[in-house]
Image (cartoon, helix red, strand yellow):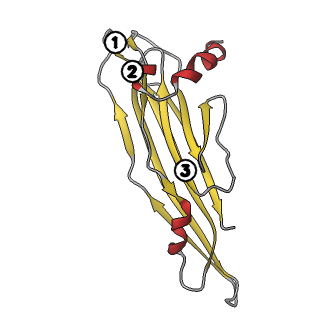
Amino acid sequence: MRRRWLIPLVFPLFGFECEYFDDVVVPASDTQPPMLATRMWIDGDERLVLWPHEQILDAQQAASLLIAPAVYDSGGAMRLDVQQGVRVYCHDDDADPEEGQQTIIDLFPRSENQGGGPGSTVSNGLFLVGDVFDLTTYETYCYSGFDLVEVAYFWEVSGRDFAGNLSQMNGSVLYYRP
């Protein structure tokens, strides 16, 4: 029941400006996991995805993107983590037998947290602003003679509240060479 009425309330909150989050008092107990969201700009088009209501299964042709993950919890958001990476897949049709090449680039993890505990006043939300990626620039990772097949930008977001409840979501966006 709680999640049904949170959707209309949280949707405007995830404009991801500090002004959209409120100060709350951390309760002595909390059994509900925090809510996660990822605000994305893919080739200039904005999109908002909420968890646990919607998973990101995005396989569209995208060249540039930016993600801004956030965590929300009515009893206070303690920590937000994001791990990002890029996978480049290339192929050589002329080789006999044909060859494929995969390169995985792990990016530095990012996190935001706040201190507190039961009875303390904290923010009910935290957010991070990711880097802008131009997936077309990863073509240089292909070996000589190999052609780019796709570049996948992928991420995993986790959020924790002060009771230790954990939520996780992941997603990816693909770029196919035109």
Residue at horizontal 52 percent and vertical 67 percent from the top? 138
Residue 103 appears in the rendering: no
Q: Which mark is residue 162?
A: 2
**Left or right: 153 in relation to 105:** right
- Give the Cα separation between the discs numbered 2 and 3: 31 Å
Q: Secondary structure at mark 1?
A: loop
Place of residue 112 in the rendered image (x, y in percent of width and height, measured from the top left)? 36, 35
Residue at horizontal 57 percent and vertical 44 percent from the top? 41
Q: Secondary structure at mark 3?
A: strand
Place of residue 28 in the rendered image (x, y in percent of width and height, measured from the top left)? 39, 9
User: Along the polypeptide, which appears first: circle 1 or circle 2?
Assistant: 1
Residue at horizontal 54 percent and vertical 76 percent from the top? 142
Name which residue type carries label 1.
Pro
Residue 139 appears in the rendering: yes
Residue labelled with disc 3: 65
Name which residue type carries label 3.
Leu
Q: Secondary structure at mark 2?
A: loop
Place of residue 58 in the rendered image (x, y in percent of width and height, measured from the top left)? 67, 47
**Contact flag, marks 2 and 3 (Cβ < 8 Å):** no
- Give the Cα separation between the discs numbered 1 and 2: 8 Å
Q: Quadrant of the C terminus?
A: bottom right
Q: 7 above or below 53? A: above
Q: Nearer the viewer, mark 1 or mark 3?
A: 3
Q: Which mark is residue 118?
A: 1
